[in-house]
Image (cartoon, grey):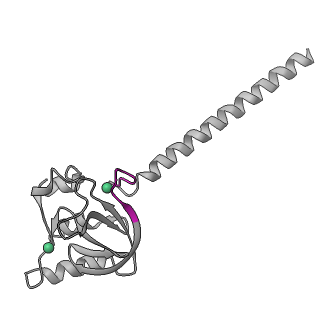
Amino acid sequence: MSRGGGRGLLFTRKTISTILLVGVVVVLLLLSALLSNLPDGGTPGNGSAEYFTDTVTKIVDGDTLYVGDVKIRLVLVDTPEVGENGFEEATQFAAGLCPVGSNATVDQDDGQLYDRYGRMLAVVYCGGKNLNEELLEEGHAVILTQYCDESEFGDQEWAREYGC
Ligand SMILES: [Ca+2]
Ligand SMILES: [Ca+2]
Protein backbone atom coordinates (compact mmCIF):
# COMPACT_ATOMS: atom_id res chain seq x y z
CA MET A 1 0.00 0.00 0.00
CA SER A 2 2.76 2.36 0.97
CA ARG A 3 4.68 1.22 -2.16
CA GLY A 4 1.75 2.06 -4.42
CA GLY A 5 1.29 5.42 -2.71
CA GLY A 6 4.99 6.19 -3.15
CA ARG A 7 4.82 5.46 -6.89
CA GLY A 8 1.75 7.66 -7.24
CA LEU A 9 3.53 10.54 -5.54
CA LEU A 10 6.66 10.10 -7.67
CA PHE A 11 4.62 10.12 -10.88
CA THR A 12 2.83 13.28 -9.79
CA ARG A 13 6.09 15.06 -9.01
CA LYS A 14 7.55 14.06 -12.39
CA THR A 15 4.45 15.27 -14.18
CA ILE A 16 4.51 18.61 -12.37
CA SER A 17 8.20 19.19 -13.12
CA THR A 18 7.66 18.25 -16.78
CA ILE A 19 4.78 20.71 -17.05
CA LEU A 20 6.92 23.42 -15.40
CA LEU A 21 9.83 22.73 -17.76
CA VAL A 22 7.58 22.91 -20.82
CA GLY A 23 6.08 26.13 -19.46
CA VAL A 24 9.50 27.72 -18.99
CA VAL A 25 10.58 26.73 -22.52
CA VAL A 26 7.39 28.18 -24.02
CA VAL A 27 7.85 31.47 -22.14
CA LEU A 28 11.49 31.71 -23.28
CA LEU A 29 10.51 31.05 -26.90
CA LEU A 30 7.81 33.73 -26.75
CA LEU A 31 10.26 36.22 -25.20
CA SER A 32 12.92 35.62 -27.85
CA ALA A 33 10.30 36.00 -30.60
CA LEU A 34 9.19 39.30 -29.08
CA LEU A 35 12.74 40.63 -28.68
CA SER A 36 13.76 39.69 -32.22
CA ASN A 37 10.94 41.89 -33.51
CA LEU A 38 12.33 45.05 -31.90
CA PRO A 39 12.41 47.82 -32.90
CA ASP A 40 9.04 48.07 -34.54
CA GLY A 41 9.19 47.16 -38.21
CA GLY A 42 12.65 45.64 -37.95
CA THR A 43 13.51 42.70 -40.16
CA PRO A 44 16.82 41.36 -38.84
CA GLY A 45 18.33 38.63 -40.97
CA ASN A 46 15.87 39.11 -43.80
CA GLY A 47 17.53 38.32 -47.13
CA SER A 48 20.87 40.01 -47.84
CA ALA A 49 19.85 43.31 -46.29
CA GLU A 50 21.70 44.53 -43.24
CA TYR A 51 20.35 45.28 -39.79
CA PHE A 52 22.78 46.75 -37.29
CA THR A 53 23.33 49.19 -34.46
CA ASP A 54 26.31 51.55 -34.39
CA THR A 55 27.33 55.08 -33.45
CA VAL A 56 26.13 58.10 -35.42
CA THR A 57 29.35 59.65 -36.75
CA LYS A 58 28.09 62.47 -39.01
CA ILE A 59 24.90 64.27 -40.03
CA VAL A 60 25.16 65.32 -43.68
CA ASP A 61 21.67 66.80 -44.01
CA GLY A 62 18.10 65.94 -43.04
CA ASP A 63 17.95 62.70 -45.00
CA THR A 64 21.60 61.60 -45.08
CA LEU A 65 23.87 60.55 -42.23
CA TYR A 66 26.73 58.25 -41.34
CA VAL A 67 26.21 55.39 -38.90
CA GLY A 68 29.63 53.93 -38.15
CA ASP A 69 31.39 54.34 -41.50
CA VAL A 70 28.26 53.57 -43.55
CA LYS A 71 26.63 56.43 -45.45
CA ILE A 72 22.87 56.11 -45.09
CA ARG A 73 20.17 57.69 -47.24
CA LEU A 74 16.87 57.60 -45.35
CA VAL A 75 14.49 55.70 -47.58
CA LEU A 76 11.13 57.04 -48.87
CA VAL A 77 11.77 60.57 -47.56
CA ASP A 78 13.32 63.71 -49.03
CA THR A 79 14.45 66.80 -47.12
CA PRO A 80 15.53 70.14 -48.68
CA GLU A 81 19.01 70.48 -50.23
CA VAL A 82 21.63 73.08 -49.25
CA GLY A 83 20.32 76.56 -50.05
CA GLU A 84 16.70 75.40 -50.15
CA ASN A 85 14.04 76.52 -47.71
CA GLY A 86 14.00 74.30 -44.63
CA PHE A 87 17.46 72.81 -45.11
CA GLU A 88 18.83 74.02 -41.76
CA GLU A 89 15.69 73.01 -39.87
CA ALA A 90 15.63 69.49 -41.32
CA THR A 91 19.35 68.98 -40.69
CA GLN A 92 19.09 70.21 -37.11
CA PHE A 93 16.04 68.05 -36.48
CA ALA A 94 17.91 64.94 -37.63
CA ALA A 95 20.92 65.92 -35.49
CA GLY A 96 18.62 66.43 -32.52
CA LEU A 97 16.96 63.03 -32.79
CA CYS A 98 20.18 61.18 -33.74
CA PRO A 99 23.03 63.18 -32.17
CA VAL A 100 26.59 62.42 -33.27
CA GLY A 101 27.97 59.94 -30.73
CA SER A 102 24.61 58.34 -29.96
CA ASN A 103 23.50 54.87 -31.03
CA ALA A 104 21.35 54.31 -34.11
CA THR A 105 19.79 51.12 -35.44
CA VAL A 106 19.82 50.74 -39.22
CA ASP A 107 17.22 48.61 -41.02
CA GLN A 108 18.34 48.40 -44.65
CA ASP A 109 15.57 48.34 -47.24
CA ASP A 110 15.22 44.74 -48.44
CA GLY A 111 13.45 46.00 -51.56
CA GLN A 112 16.15 48.47 -52.64
CA LEU A 113 19.50 48.05 -50.90
CA TYR A 114 21.44 51.10 -52.21
CA ASP A 115 20.74 54.21 -54.24
CA ARG A 116 22.61 55.09 -57.43
CA TYR A 117 25.26 56.95 -55.41
CA GLY A 118 26.05 53.83 -53.38
CA ARG A 119 24.36 55.09 -50.24
CA MET A 120 22.61 52.47 -48.13
CA LEU A 121 18.83 52.93 -48.25
CA ALA A 122 17.36 52.38 -44.79
CA VAL A 123 15.09 53.31 -41.96
CA VAL A 124 17.07 54.62 -38.99
CA TYR A 125 15.91 54.33 -35.39
CA CYS A 126 17.27 56.62 -32.67
CA GLY A 127 16.12 56.44 -29.08
CA GLY A 128 13.39 54.05 -30.20
CA LYS A 129 12.05 56.56 -32.76
CA ASN A 130 11.86 56.10 -36.52
CA LEU A 131 13.80 59.08 -37.95
CA ASN A 132 12.20 58.71 -41.39
CA GLU A 133 8.73 58.87 -39.86
CA GLU A 134 9.56 61.74 -37.50
CA LEU A 135 10.88 63.89 -40.39
CA LEU A 136 7.57 63.42 -42.21
CA GLU A 137 5.52 63.98 -39.09
CA GLU A 138 7.29 67.26 -38.28
CA GLY A 139 6.98 68.52 -41.85
CA HIS A 140 10.73 68.48 -42.56
CA ALA A 141 10.45 65.92 -45.38
CA VAL A 142 8.15 64.86 -48.18
CA ILE A 143 7.49 61.23 -49.07
CA LEU A 144 8.89 59.79 -52.31
CA THR A 145 5.80 57.95 -53.52
CA GLN A 146 7.52 56.62 -56.66
CA TYR A 147 9.42 54.14 -54.44
CA CYS A 148 6.47 52.94 -52.33
CA ASP A 149 5.96 49.70 -54.28
CA GLU A 150 9.64 48.80 -54.40
CA SER A 151 10.41 49.57 -50.79
CA GLU A 152 10.22 47.07 -47.95
CA PHE A 153 8.61 49.84 -45.91
CA GLY A 154 6.05 51.06 -48.47
CA ASP A 155 3.18 49.24 -46.80
CA GLN A 156 4.07 50.22 -43.25
CA GLU A 157 1.61 52.41 -41.41
CA TRP A 158 3.84 55.52 -41.25
CA ALA A 159 4.56 55.37 -45.01
CA ARG A 160 0.90 54.89 -45.86
CA GLU A 161 -0.08 57.77 -43.63
CA TYR A 162 2.01 60.17 -45.73
CA GLY A 163 1.03 58.91 -49.17
CA CYS A 164 2.30 55.40 -49.92
CA1 LIG B 1 17.25 65.69 -49.98
CA1 LIG C 1 15.27 45.37 -43.72
Which image quarter holds the N terminus?
Answer: top right
From which residue to which does the magenta span run? 42-52
Q: Picture coordinates of residue 12 (x, y %)?
A: 75, 25
Residue 145 inside the magenta-drawn segment: no
Residue 160 horizontal side relative to residue 99, left or right = left
Relative to 73, residue 21 above or below: above
- Rendered view: 28 above or below 117: above
**Relative vertical location of residue 108 with respect to residue 117 in this rendering, above or below:** above
Residue 74 drawn at (x, y percent): 23, 67
Residue placed furthest toward the right: 2
Q: Is residue 158 left or right of residue 16?
A: left
Quarter of the rendering containing residue 25: top right
**Toward the viewer: 16 or 87?**
87
Magenta run includes residue 48: yes
Q: Residue furthest left?
A: 84
Q: Is residue 55 left or right of residue 150?
A: right
